[in-house]
Amino acid sequence: LSATITPATASTGQLGCLLQDLIKKANTSAHPTGYGAAAVGDHQYVVVAGTPTSTTTANVPMGTAPSTGVTDPFFSTTNGTVSTETKTVTKTTYTVGRQVYKCYGVISLGLCLATPGGAVLGNQWGDGNSTANGYVPSFQVTITQTTYSNFVQGATAVSSFPSMSDVTQYQMGTVSTNATGQTATFGLSGPGDLYVEGTAANTMALVGSNDVIVTNKLGPADPSSAALEVVARNDVRVYHPVQCAVANTTLIGYTTPGFCPDDITGLFYGVAPSGARPDQQYVNMRPDLAGLTITAVIFALGNSASHITCPQPPSGGGVCGGELTADNYNRGAPLGQLTEIGTIGVQHHAPVGQEWQVTDTTGQTSRPYSGYQLAQQYLNVQALIQAVPDVNNLIPLTSTVSSLWHVVSVSSTGNS
């Protein structure tokens, strides 16, 4: 028994193994003297390849697009894209045929002749009837080969802060050089901010070298048995990202960082018409922060390093340090009440929202505002804090030293 694989290709080895196995299973005869020399009546199988057919498909997805898996709205997330390749499927049908070893001419005096009286032909392999080198098809095998090329790497999933749409100017630390003399864009010494939210099961203190930024509801699980102490060596801020109400890709490059192109702050007097006020040029990116509650003792010490600038106004200038405030308090739609349950200890009084001018109207009882309206509720947690050694005396809970408040604005007669 033998097999012939034609034509010879890169897949001959794999194909040969497969078809040889099939041939052995189909063969029912055995030559008594082996395969070295065929005897009349022996049979074998040959494999003949048909013309391959190929189908090519471009940009075939490879797996699935990567996902960040991040559901926290504090982070800006962008899922990745799937990698692709060009897929080529080639199908080749192989016919397996049976041959018999015999004389396919005329037998005369024990010799196999081509024709009577002709040259000696000799025994050959053929279809077993009258055709030398022919075969009788027995079955077919279709081999499918799949190859890939032109691999295109998909984009990775990214979770980042802040969002590229957020116009807020966040601190990035001092600009300096690293050990190899390269400029460190974000500074070797960052601002030391602490971003925090959530529910604490036990009494604990949260300390930030610069600012503590509250990014959502914060407090103990049970205020009767546990307390939080929030200590910022500079400011305690409420996270409030905003983006431009109108995306202006042309003018944004010519606008002061931190402002939207349509913001007319400082360029109007009197009462701005509805839709033109500065606060209306911004959209709250986190409307879920409306009605935020913080249950904690808040200390804003105001003794940060001198390179840390004030987060208000948005341009990053002005007096600051030791404030409880909200980012972008003067931008976007109103966020309702910011409820602080506990105690507030600050160096300077700072805004968490802003009211806006409107035309006087008889019977008018309110004005539009942006940001929050502060609602402070006193809660004595001194005993809970003193019960935890690691928290007790971190900040003195009693003091006789007074501090001057930073005056933001003064109402004069007739303008109240």
Image (spheres, helix red, strand yellow):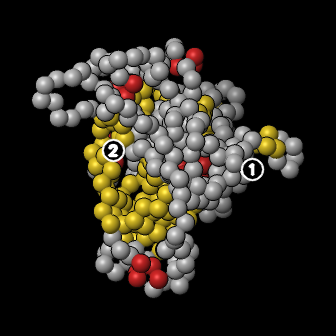
Question: Could you tell me which residue is drawn at 53 percent across and 57 percent down?
Answer: 403
Does residue 86 sit above or below 224 in this rendering?
Answer: above
Marks 1 and 2, how far apart in space?
35 Å
Q: Position of residue 259 (x, y in %)?
A: 50, 26
In the displayed orientation, state which residue is furthest to the top. Answer: 250
Where, by quadrant of the figure, is residue 413 drawn?
top left
Q: Position of residue 127 (x, y in %)?
A: 50, 37
Residues packed near mark 2 inside 10 Å, few (<14), some (14 to 19) or many (20 plus)? many
In the displayed orientation, state which residue is furthest to the left. Answer: 363
Marker disc for residue 148:
none
Provide the secondary structure element on which disc 2 rests: strand
**Three-letter amino acid code at the position of disc 1:** Leu
> Which quarter of the rendered picture does the C terminus lie within?
top left
Q: Earlier in the sequence, mark 1 or mark 2?
A: 1
Give the residue pinned by disc 2: 372
Give the residue pinned by disc 1: 188
